[in-house]
Amino acid sequence: MADVNPFVYSRPLAPEDVLDREPEIRQLLSLAAGGHYVRLYAPRRFGKTSLLGKAFAEAERGGELVPVLVDLYGVLSYADVTIRIERAYAQLKGTIRKTIEAILRTTGLGLSLGAPGISVKLQLEPRTDPLPALHALLDLPQRVAERSGTRVFVALDEFQDIAKVQDFDKLLRSHIQHQGESASYIFCGSEPGMMRELFDVKGRPLYGQAEPLRLGRLPDGEVAAYIAERFARTKRSADLVLDALLATARGHPQRAMLLAHRLWDEVGPGKAADEDDWQNALARTRNQVAAEFDALWRGLEANEQRALRAIALFPEAPYGARALGAVDLKKSGAHYAVRSLLAKGELEEESGRTVFVDPLFELWLNDVQRGREDAPL
Ligand SMILES: Nc1ncnc2c1ncn2[C@@H]1O[C@H](COP(=O)(O)OP(=O)(O)OP(=O)(O)O)[C@@H](O)[C@H]1O
Ligand SMILES: [Mg+2]
């Protein structure tokens, strides 16, 4: 057997690799089965797409739902949304795919689950109006349910990005409000501010329409077991440094896997990771993520930078006179900046405290503050 690193950190996981999340999946599936809408929120890289994949795999095994996973990342126009939805249906296989192909053919709009779908048409003839095709795609769940008797389970991943497509939420609502019997919708997003804007502001088309479900951090005990098992399976051990890794990752799913991946790389077959291996893995991880944090940092307002610094320096009392004095920030400015960082998902409230979502971002910031020689600037 090839000696392959068993920790994936850069893409959604296969269902069998997803740790836990069982209660969330149960809840999601039962709401969906009841025809309710769900709004699934988690910070970036907390495992939303992986969870959807696992939930879909379970739903498919039950055979009662047709799962459609639409990735709306970066959409800017109706044409983009149309293409993404068509591509999502194109992932389906078997008889349900044939049923859908047949329905699409009757529309005469050039929609198809094969290669020459609407994306090709929109590219070759950029003036094509995407709206008729989009209407047809949004009606699809109802028609599928009529023909096959199966509920369609639509997950709209990166849903916050539709905020850039004018009135798409209005259009969507006009279709889905009649689909209580035929479809269930999950709106999935990582920016709390944008998600609130879409669902919690009175007068917005989707106001109050979806049951909120939040993905939190992973419990240390489960992360430890997952990592230990994968080290053991590949004839290695992480026991000596596992606590240090858990303390650094703080339950952040992707950060835990990234650190485990780097640590595994330091350890030869048949060996146990020691303190040196851990320090090397941590240093490599810090190097790897530095550019990302540098870009993030440069994109922040000066007061946001000050507020983050205050929290990193004085996590117990970031609004105290000492903290604010140290970063040259007024209290009102601090509150405003923190609100904006919460809305962007860089900070979150945890048992009454404001904390960094990403523990590695906090480490990076501490490095920069200390002016460490090897700190990325
Ligand atoms: N339940 C989990 N068990 C193990 N690892 C996980 C889990 N959830 C997330 N991860 C880790 O996080 C990484 C990112 O997962 P995923 O792409 O599903 O997150 P996401 O929230 O959809 O991210 P994005 O915000 O970038 O779309 C995975 O590659 C994996 O390393
Ligand atoms: Mg995702």
Image (cartoon, grey):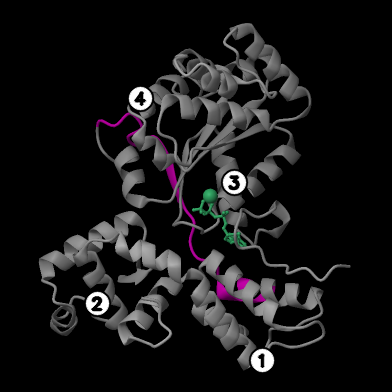
In which quadrant will I find the N terminus? Answer: bottom right
Outermost residue, right side: 1
Q: Where is residue 306 in the image (x, y as percent from the top left)?
A: 22, 72
Q: Position of residue 319 (x, y in %)?
A: 18, 75
Q: Label 1: which residue?
A: 274
Q: What residue type is labelled 2?
A: Ala
**Gap between marks 1 and 4 measured at Cα:** 56 Å
Q: Of the residues under marks 4 and 3, which one precedes in the sequence?
A: 3
Q: Label 3: which residue?
A: 52
Name the disc covering residue 262, or none.
none
Q: What residue type is labelled 3?
A: Leu
Name the disc covering residue 170, or none.
4
Q: Label 2: which residue?
A: 310
Specify the segment rendered in magenta: 203-225
| Disc 4 to disc 3: CB gap under 8 Å | no
Residue situated in front as seen by the camera: 374 or 166? 374
Count neighbours of disc 2 (C-alpha within 10 A) and say few if under 14, some if 14 to 19, many if 20 or more. Answer: many
**Gap between marks 4 and 3 measured at Cα:** 24 Å
Ligand 1 resides in the quarter of the picture at bottom right
Count neighbours of disc 1 (C-alpha within 10 A) and say few if under 14, some if 14 to 19, many if 20 or more. Answer: some
Q: Is residue 212 magenta?
A: yes
| Disc 2 to disc 3: CB gap under 8 Å | no
| Residue located 40% across and 20% down the image | 174
Q: From this view, report whether residue 289 is shown above or below residue 60.
A: below
Q: Of the residues under marks 4 and 2, which one precedes in the sequence?
A: 4
Q: Which amino acid does label 1 sit on?
A: Asp
> Nearer the viewer's eye, disc 1 or disc 4?
1
Disc 3 Cβ-to-ligand 1 distance below 8 Å: yes
Count neighbours of disc 4 (C-alpha within 10 A) and say few if under 14, some if 14 to 19, many if 20 or more. Answer: few
